[in-house]
Image: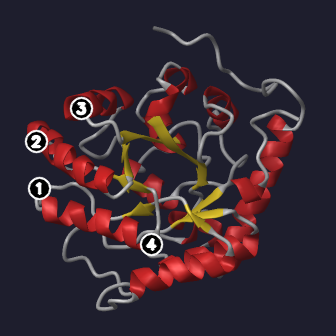
Amino acid sequence: MNPRHRDVGALTLGFLTLGAQAAPLDVIHAAADAGFGAAGPRISGRYPGDAWASVDGRPDAFEEIRRVAAQRGVRLSSISGYYISPQVKLEHLLANVSAAKAVGAPLILQGCFDGDQPRVAALVRDYAAAAREAGVRIALEFMPMSELRTLAQTVDLIAATGAGNVGILVDALHLARSGATARDVAALDPSLVYLTQLCDAPEKLAEGDTLFNEAMAGRRLLGDGGLDLAGLVDALPPDAELELETPAIQHADLSPALRARHAAEAARQFFARHFLAGGQSPTSTQETPTP
C-alpha cells in the first residue's frame, strides 16, 4: 500500500464543501454520516459584525460543538474565524483563539486581507503568543485574491513574526492560481505545512471568471478537473493533514449529508486511482525540488 493512500476516515471535511454558510453542527454531522474522521467548521463570520446565526447570541454554542463532535466520533482538526483585515484588532484574533480552545480544535485557519505588512506581522506575533498559551497553532492561507498572495510571501511573514506555532495552509486551487506547483511545496520545510486543502478545478481560470468566484463556486470534486493533485499529495509527508474543500456547484441544492457523501466517494476514487499501489503515484509530475 502506498503510504500516501488515505481512507475517508483519515480525511477532514472542510466546511466549504457544504457551502459558504455551512453551520458547524451541520459540518460535524455530515462528516460523521459520510465517514470522515475529522471536520473543519467555520465558527464566526469572516469579518467583525458579520452575522453567523448558528453561533451568534448562544453562549453555549462552542460547548455544544465540542460535545456533538465527541458524540459523533469526529475530530475537530481546525476552525476558521475572523480574517485579518484593516478593521480587525488583536481582540478579534484572540476571539479566534478562545473559540479554538473552547471547541477543542488545535489549529486556526487564517486568511489575510490587510496589505499593511508591518501591522500584520505585529498582529500575528501577538496572536501567535496567545495561541501558544492555549496550545493552538495558526495556519496562514495564501490566496492570490487576498493580501497574502503567494507561498513566498507567507514564508516571509512567518519569518517576520518569529513565532514557532505559525505555519502554512496550502490550498490546491490557490497554489495553482498563484503560479506555484507541487515542486514548490516539496521544497518547503515539511514542518511548516500545517494543513493542505484538496479540491479540483480546470487547469486554468475560465475566461471572464474571477479568482474569488472560482474559489467559492468553481471548485470541483477530486478527479473532475485538471489540477496536479497527485503531485501535490506526493510532495507532502505521508502523515500530512488533508482536508477536502470541494463545494461542487452541481450539488448546491443537495443536503449537507449528500454533499459530503459525494465528496467522500470522489476522494475514495482519487486515492484508489493514484495511491493504492506501493511507491509514488504513477501520474505524479513531481520532480526534484528546485532551490
Q: CA distance from mark 1 to mark 3?
A: 22 Å
Q: Mark 1 falls on what kind of element?
A: loop
| Snapshot quadrant of residue 36 | bottom right
* Vertical relation: 42 (above or below) 115: below
Image marks 4 and 3: residues in contact by CB distance under 8 Å: no
Please name which of the two marks, 4 or 2, marks the residue nearer to the observer: 4
Circles 1 and 2 in contact, beta carbons < 8 Å:
yes
Q: Does residue 44 lie above or below 107 as drawn?
A: below
Q: Earlier in the sequence, mark 2 or mark 3?
A: 2
Q: Secondary structure at mark 3?
A: loop
Residue depicted at x 61% and y 10%: 288
Q: Is label 2 in a helix, a strand or a loop?
A: loop
Q: Amino acid at mark 3?
A: Gly
| Residue highlighted by disc 4 | 103
Which residue is label 3 attached to? 162
Where residue 34 sits: x, y (%)? 74, 71
Q: Amino acid at mark 1?
A: Pro
Q: Position of residue 124 (x, y in %)?
A: 21, 46
Of discs 1 and 4, which sits in the foreground? 4
**The quarter of the displayed image where residue 94 is located:** bottom left
Disc 1 versus disc 4: distance between alpha carbons? 27 Å
The residue that label 1 is drawn on is 86
Residue 280 position in % (x across, y down): 78, 24
